[in-house]
Image: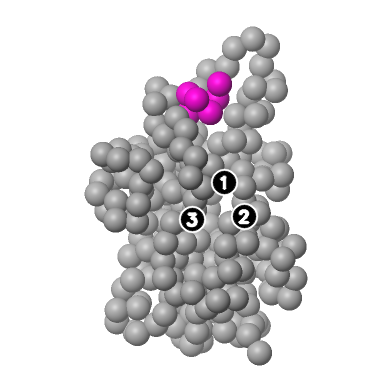
Amino acid sequence: MESILITGGTGMVGRHLQDILPDAHYVGSEYDLRDYLDTENLFKEYKPTRVIHLAARVGGIQDNINKPAEYFDDNILINTNVMSMCRTYQVKRFTGILSTCIYPDVVDNYPMTEDDLFKGPPAPTNFSYGYAKRCLAVQVNAYNQQYKTNYNYLIPCNLYSEYDNFEHGNKMHFITALLEKIKNSSKEIELFGTGIPQRQFMYAGDLAKVIKEVIDKDITESFNVACPENYSINELAK
C-alpha cells in the first residue's frame, strides 16, 4: 500500500490535490522543514513511500527583493532536509515541484525548454529564490546519479487559482496581484519592469492533475508543465 506524503499540502497546489487525492497525507506549517529534527519527526510519523514536495518559502517580488538571504537559506534548508529524509527512510519516489523562476531571465527563444535551464542566471528580482529552487533540480539529479534513486521534478509555468493567498499582498502570485491592483485602481495602474518579458500562465488545478498522472503512471522523468499560450506581461495586463 503506497503512503503518499505531500509537503506544503495546505498551499495553493496542495489544496487542489486534496480534491483529487483525498487519501494522501497533507502537512503544512505544523512541521518546520527548515529544522532537521522536525523533518525527521514528520517522516517517522507518516513513513511515506512517495513524497510530493510542494513546501517552500514563497512571496512576491518586493518581499524577494527585501529578504534575499532568507529566501535562499530557508529553501535550501527545506529541500535538503526533505531529500535527506527521503534517502534515510528509503522513499521509493520523490517529486519536487519547482518554479518557472529557476529559468534564465533572458534566452534566445521562447517558450523555454528543459535544455535552457542552465543557460543563464534567474531574474534579478527573485535571484536568490530562483537559484535555491534551481538547486533542488541539481540535488535530484545528484541523488539519482550517486544513490541510484528514481526521483524527479516538475517545473510548472506561472500559476493562478482561487486558492491563492488573497489576504497577504507579499505572498500573492502575479495574476492575483495584478487583479487586485486593477480592482483597487481608479484609472491607471503601474507595473514593475518594461512589460516585455514573456510568460505562460496555468491554472493550479491543472498542475494538480499532472501530479496525479505522475503518481498513477509512476512517471520518473523530469519535465516542464505549461500551456501553449505565451504572452508578454504588457499583453497580459492589457
Q: Which of 100 and 130 is in front in this view?
A: 100
Q: Are marks 1 and 2 in contact (CB under 8 Å)?
A: yes
Rendered-image quadrant of the C terminus: top right
Cα distance, mark 3 to mark 2? 9 Å
- Bounds of the magenta segment: 233-238
Q: Can residue 85 be seen in this view?
A: no
Q: What residue type is labelled 2?
A: Asp
* Residue annotated with mark 2: 206
Q: Which of 198 and 124 is in front in this view?
A: 198
Q: Residue furthest bottom?
A: 1
Task: Describe the element under mark 3 as helix, strand or loop.
Answer: strand
- Label 3 or label 2, whichever comes before in sequence order: 2
Task: Describe the element under mark 2 as helix, strand or loop.
Answer: helix
* Residue annotated with mark 3: 225
Residue 138 placement, left or right of 101: left
Q: Which quarter of the picture shows residue 111? A: top left
In the image, which disc is placed on residue 202? Answer: 1
